[in-house]
Amino acid sequence: MIGLFCGSLTEEKNTFADHGKTLIFYKFKEFAQVIVILIANDNNFIACLCEKGLELPAPENVFPDRNWGCYGSLQGDMAFWLDVYWRLFLIV
């Protein structure tokens, strides 16, 4: 999983298991942000997270020094960020 991300990562990984339910938690810094990835097999936990209304940071917050309106096509770190963190939300 970590192989998907560019650069060297300082990661924190924990696994919690109880009564057949498992939560895997990854936390690391990338793109000047703290990234948290959760993998769970508990539908109630996922539903609870969805109810929280959590959102990804907007591109202008992740890349404050760039003007997204000036780019005709994305390349490099901006394209990677869009593909890994946003693409799934854009195709839904």
Image: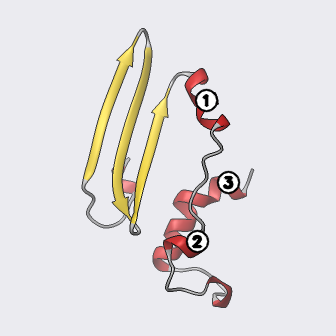
Q: Residue at x 61, y 52 (%)?
A: 55
Q: Residue at x 60, y 59 (%)?
A: 86
Q: Nearer the viewer, mark 1 or mark 3?
A: 1
Residue beneath label 1, please? Answer: 48
- Label 2, secondary structure: give it: helix
How far across and down, in percent of the image, does residue 69 sit? 68, 86
- The amino acid on which the numbered mark 3 sits, given as a three-letter code, is Phe
Residue at x 53%, y 80% (from the top left corner): 75
Instruction: Calculate the distance from the C-alpha at mark 1 to the C-alpha at mark 3.
Output: 18 Å
**Circle 3 — which element?**
helix
In the image, is residue 69 above or below residue 11?
A: below
Does the CB distance between marks 3 and 2 fall below 8 Å?
A: no
Residue bearing mark 3: 89
Q: Is residue 31 toward the left or the right of residue 70 in the image?
A: left
Amino acid carrying label 1: it is Cys
Whether label 1 touches label 3, CB < 8 Å: no
Residue, far bottom: 70
Dot 3: few (<14), some (14–19), or many (≥20) neighbours within 10 Å? few
Residue flagged by tag 2: what amino acid is it? Pro
Instruction: Residue under label 2, please give it.
Output: 59
Residue lying furthest top: 19
SS at badge 1: helix
Earlier along the polypeptide chain: callout 1 or callout 3?
1
Q: Few, some or many C-alpha atoms within 10 Å of disc 2 (few <14, some 14-19, many ≥20)? A: some
| Mark 1, other Cα within 10 Å: few <14 / some 14–19 / many ≥20 | few
Drawn side of residue 24 relative to residue 42, left or right: left
Query: What is the x, y in percent for residue 62?
Result: 50, 71
Numbered badge on residue 9: none
Identity of the residue drawn at 57% across and 66% down? 82
Which of discs 2 and 1 lies nearer the camera? The answer is 1
Residue 57 drawn at (x, y percent):
56, 62
